[in-house]
Amino acid sequence: MKVVGVIPARYDSTRLPGKMLIPICGKPLIQWVYERARQARHLDQLVVAADDERIADAVRGFGGNVMMTAKDHPSGTDRVAEAVEAMDASAVINIQGDEPLVDPRLIDRLADVMRDGVWDMATAASPIRDPADLENHAAVKVVFGQEGHALYFSRSRIPHVRDGNGEPVDGLHWRHIGIYAYRRSFLELLVQAPPCELELAEKLEQLRALYIGGRMTVLTTDHTALGVDTPDDIPKAEAALKAAGLV
């Protein structure tokens, strides 16, 4: 099985336009993501799926692989699906282009899960330890079954602990990390399906995969994703890179 990593990169980000090219400790954001993802050992190929020549030029400038895709895709998933249309890939990993500290070991774990052949999709989650994250609608929560299969994702606090004190419960409250692995055939099915009511209500695309019957496993990790979505996130990312000894 050939596993391909794709980093969807859109120029016109709503909250931070041009963020893929914003300098983070002297390198454009997309370069940090690419170089981290390239450390994964179980990918057969890695490519940036860009919608703008400015991103493509930057990727070529640091020696990365890039493919141009349409500008009008409604989601990163659709952009990834276009990128792999002409590629020899049995499974695809969608790597978020705004997470400069993406964990290459997690990418390898996702690739291995796809090679096992049991699941249609795989994603990841980390423990919630900060009570504020339970109420933060930007922090997506996930619950999963004893075999690791995803049951539901929500921006609200799930599960609700009726007799709790408002604190996160270890082993019960998990924050979703937005990295996805797909069996290619399921990715094609997913992008052809219309958005479901659950997805539209929560504004969470992964609910469409569950709605159409996809078997999705959730890998647990202590790694906490750090996305760059607003100008305030830039100094946070630079501090995290320095703390990790990457600068």
Image (cartoon, rainbow, N blue to C red):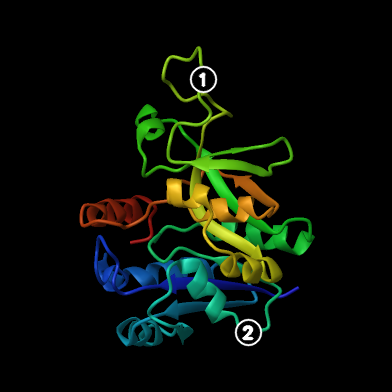
SS at circle 2? loop
Q: Is residue 189 left or right of residue 67?
A: right
Residue 74: x and y, percent? 42, 69
Residue 23: x and y, percent? 25, 69
Residue at the spot of label 1:
161
Of the 4 image quadrants, the one containing the N terminus is: bottom right
Task: Give the quadrant of residue 26.
Answer: bottom left
Task: Give the quadrant of residue 238.
Answer: bottom left
Looking at the rendered image, the disc whose residue lies closer to the viewer, 2 or 1, is 1
Residue 116: x and y, percent? 78, 59
The answer to whether the residue labelled 2 contacts the one labelled 1, judged by CB atoms less than 8 Å apart, is no
- Up the image or down, 172 lies above or below 198; here it is above
From the viewer's side, name the closer residue of 143 and 124.
143
SS at circle 1? loop
Residue situated furthest left in the rendering: 231
User: Is residue 194 at least partly visible in the picture?
Assistant: yes
Q: How many marks?
A: 2
Residue at the spot of label 2:
87
Q: Which mark is residue 212?
A: none
Residue 147: x and y, percent? 74, 40
User: Is residue 42 at least partly visible in the picture?
Assistant: no
Residue at (65, 68) in percent of width and height: 189
Residue situated furthest right in the rendering: 117
